[in-house]
């Protein structure tokens, strides 16, 4: 079966319409807040370790 480029474009567009992707659902505010708290904890631990290694004298 021979398809013209216009036919193929129409078929492709029809298939794209059928497989509509789900819409973006934003994260809950609690997830965002928890993520920032965890980033702060990791940063504090890293900087605290650097400080301890630089200035701790037994």
Image: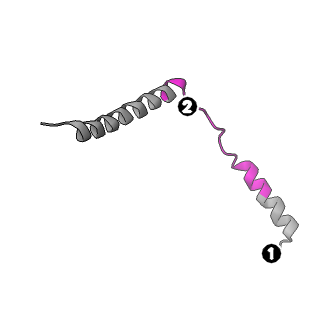
| Quadrant in the picture for residue 26 | top right
Residue 1's disc number: 1
Residue 19 point in image, percent of width and height: 69, 49
Q: Position of residue 47 (x, y in %)?
A: 34, 37
Residue drawn where x is 46% and y is 32% of the image: 35
Which image quarter holds the N terminus? bottom right
> Residue 20 vs residue 37: left or right?
right
Q: Is residue 24 on the magenta stretch?
A: yes
Residue 49 falls inside the magenta stretch: no
In the rendered structure, the answer to whether residue 43 lies left or right of residue 51 reads right
Q: Residue at x 85, y 65 (%)?
A: 7
Relative to 34, 42 lies left or right: left
- In the picture of the structure, the residue carrying the numbered disc 2 is 27
Q: CA distance from mark 2 to mark 1?
A: 48 Å
Q: Residue 32 location in percent, x, y?
A: 51, 29
| Of callouts 2 and 1, the N-terminal one | 1
């Amino acid at each position: 079966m021979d398809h013209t480029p216009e036919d193929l474009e129409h078929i492709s567009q029809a298939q794209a319409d059928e497989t509509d992707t789900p819409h973006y659902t934003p994260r809950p505010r609690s997830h965002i807040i928890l993520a920032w708290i965890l980033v702060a904890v990791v940063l504090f631990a890293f900087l605290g370790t650097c400080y301890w290694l630089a200035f701790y004298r037994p």
